Structures are given as structure tokens and as C-alpha cells.
Image (cartoon, rainbow, N blue to C red):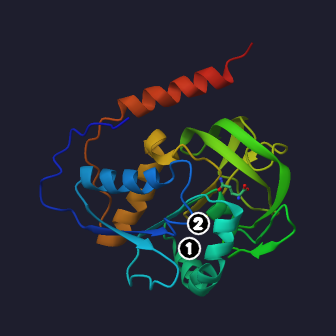
């Protein structure tokens, strides 16, 4: 579903915003590439010039980065990006502490945590930006999800074997209204530290939840331009209706 824009994206650019997509080849499943497409399109519709950079293992990161996204992947994909992630880790850690907005889904969420122990018993160390630890299981957690978050209702789809536990004091991204979330037990989903959000929600999450996309964009645009975010006018009624339907369908009391 492609929302139509009411704004005039052909006007003068309000500024150039650099978005880095980490490991699009290895870590981008269940439609996660749609998050990058969504951010690129919405930046344009809001009147900004998106500069989308794919970061592959061995690449150098650009000097000025305003937004970072990463997606899900198989355990094997996670193992393939591990060495590069360790190499660029110190830069990501300092950008996270400085407030750069980042969205990490599923496999990359796990690697932004402290560690991921796979079901085979292999330990993949994480960056520790989010105080979470993940243990792989034989049983997968699969299905549609509804969350309550500071961005309102958020909907998506999860498919993971990893069971994630928040460290003491680690804020969650949302409370589970329907679905498994981090582990199927404590009612929590994802994690947020500074402007770094980790979540299991594919879908992809951003086209389904434009309010979340615009939070990331607003912070990125302010950092890029030094001026307050100047939103354009975007017609999100299709996404808003679809989200309301998923919330109603999954949370109705029998
Ligand atoms: N391999 C991880 C897990 O199953 C991540 C899966 C994913 O990114 N969807 O927990």
C-alpha cells in the first residue's frame, strides 16, 4: 500500500539527510528493506533530500550520518556481519550516545544488545548499545503483533527463535497487547535507549506505523539541518486504517 502525498516534493530541498542501511544483503528479511524505502520516500515527501547509503562489510561509513537502520536475518547472516559490526561498533556506540536515531529490527536488534546465543550454542557478542541478552530456542515465535508504545499503537509481524530479556532498568519499546514480543513471557517488546529503538517487528514496521517513521525523520532532519523539523503534508489514511483494523482484530475481547 503506497500512501499518496499531498505535499509538493518538487520544491526547494529543506536539507540533505544521510541514512545508512546496515548490511542490506545479509540482514533484510520479511520486507525490512521497506523501512529504508519508507524513510527515503517520506523524507522526500516532507521536502528533504534523502541520501541513502548501503553499508556492506568492509565499507567505510560516511562522515556525517543522521539516521541508521538495520533489519532481520538468519543466524548465519548475523554471523557473516559480526566481524564488520565489531569494526564499526565504536562509531555506532558514540553516535547512539550522541542521540542519532537508529531502528534495528530482529537480527540487528539482537546484535545491538549485549549478546546472542544461538540455538546451536554459538555466542555472537553484541555492541551493548541496548542492555538486552538473547537466547535462541528450538521453538519460534511467529505471528502478528500489536503493541502499546509512546508512539501510540504499533503493529507488525514477528518471526524469531531468539528470546530476549531486558537488563535491569532497560526501557522496552512497547508493551505487548497481542503476540509474543521479546520472549512471550514478560509482556515487553523491543528496547529503547536514547533514540535507538530495537524491535522484533517486521511487516515492515515503518510503512505500517508512519508516526514512528516520522519520529525518526524529525530527529534526523533536526540533526542534519540544525533547524526544527518542518513536516510536509502526507496522506497516511491507508496506513492508519490498516493499523486500526489490525489492532481491532487482534485485541477484540471474546
Ligand atoms: N536469527 C534470529 C532469530 O531467529 C533473527 C531472526 C530474524 O531476524 N527474523 O531469533
Q: Nearer the viewer, residue 25 or 198?
A: 25
Q: Residues within 10 Å of mark 1 (few under 14, many from 20)?
A: some
Q: Position of residue 3 (x, y in %)?
A: 32, 37
Q: Residues within 10 Å of mark 2 (few under 14, many from 20)?
A: some
- Relative to 17, say whether 141 is above or below: above
Q: Which residue is mark 1?
A: 96
SS under mark 1: helix
Q: Residue at x 46, y 55 (%)?
A: 33
> Distance from label 1 to label 2 (Cα)?
7 Å
Of badges 1 and 2, nearer the viewer stands 1
Instruction: Tell which residue pokes out farthest to the left in this image.
Output: 11
Q: Position of residue 52 (x, y in %)?
A: 35, 67
In contact (CB < 8 Å): disc 1 and disc 2: yes
Looking at marks 1 and 2 on the same chain, the residue that comes earlier in the sequence is marked by 1
The quarter of the rendering in which ligand 1 is drawn is bottom right
Q: Position of residue 14 (x, y in %)?
A: 21, 62
Q: Position of residue 47 (x, y in %)?
A: 22, 55
- Relative to 237, say whether 117 is above or below: below
Q: Is residue 33 something that shows in the picture?
A: yes
Side of 170 relative to 14 (left or right): right
Q: Which residue is mark 2?
A: 194
Q: Quadrant of residue 16?
A: bottom left
Side of 187 relative to 231 (left or right): right
Q: Residue at x 31, y 56 (%)?
A: 43
Which quarter of the rendered picture does the N terminus lie within? top left
Amino acid at each position: 500500500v503506497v500512501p499518496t502525498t499531498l505535499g509538493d516534493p518538487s520544491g526547494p530541498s529543506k536539507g540533505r539527510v544521510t541514512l545508512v542501511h546496515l548490511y542490506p544483503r545479509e540482514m533484510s528479511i520479511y520486507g525490512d528493506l521497506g523501512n529504508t524505502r519508507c524513510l527515503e520516500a517520506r523524507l522526500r515527501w516532507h521536502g528533504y533530500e534523502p541520501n541513502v547509503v548501503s553499508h556492506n562489510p568492509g565499507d567505510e561509513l560516511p562522515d556525517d550520518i543522521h539516521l541508521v537502520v538495520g533489519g532481520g536475518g538468519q543466524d548465519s547472516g548475523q554471523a557473516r556481519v559480526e566481524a564488520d559490526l565489531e569494526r564499526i561498533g565504536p562509531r555506532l556506540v558514540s553516535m547512539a550516545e550522541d542521540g542519532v536515531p537508529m531502528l534495528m529490527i530482529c537480527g540487528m536488534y539482537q546484535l545491538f544488545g549485549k549478546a546472542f546465543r544461538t540455538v546451536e550454542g554459538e555466542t555472537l557478542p553484541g555492541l551493548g548499545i541496548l542492555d538486552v541478552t538473547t537466547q535462541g530456542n528450538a521453538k519460534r515465535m511467529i505471528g502478528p503483533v500489536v503493541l502499546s508504545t509512546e508512539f501510540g499503537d504499533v503493529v507488525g509481524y514477528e518471526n524469531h527463535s531468539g528470546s530476549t530479556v531486558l537488563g535491569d532498568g532497560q526501557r522496552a519499546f512497547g508493551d505487548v497487547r497481542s503476540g509474543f514480543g521479546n520472549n512471550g513471557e514478560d509482556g515487553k517488546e523491543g528496547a529503547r535507549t536514547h533514540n535507538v529503538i530495537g524491535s522484533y517487528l517486521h511487516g515492515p514496521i515503518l510503512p505500517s506505523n508512519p508516526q514512528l517513521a516520522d519520529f525518526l525523520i524529525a530527529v534526523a532532519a533536526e540533526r542534519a539541518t540544525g533547524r526544527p523539523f518542518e513536516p510536509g503534508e502526507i496522506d497516511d489514511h491507508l496506513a492508519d486504517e490498516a493499523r486500526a483494523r489490525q489492532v481491532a482484530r487482534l485485541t477484540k475481547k471474546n
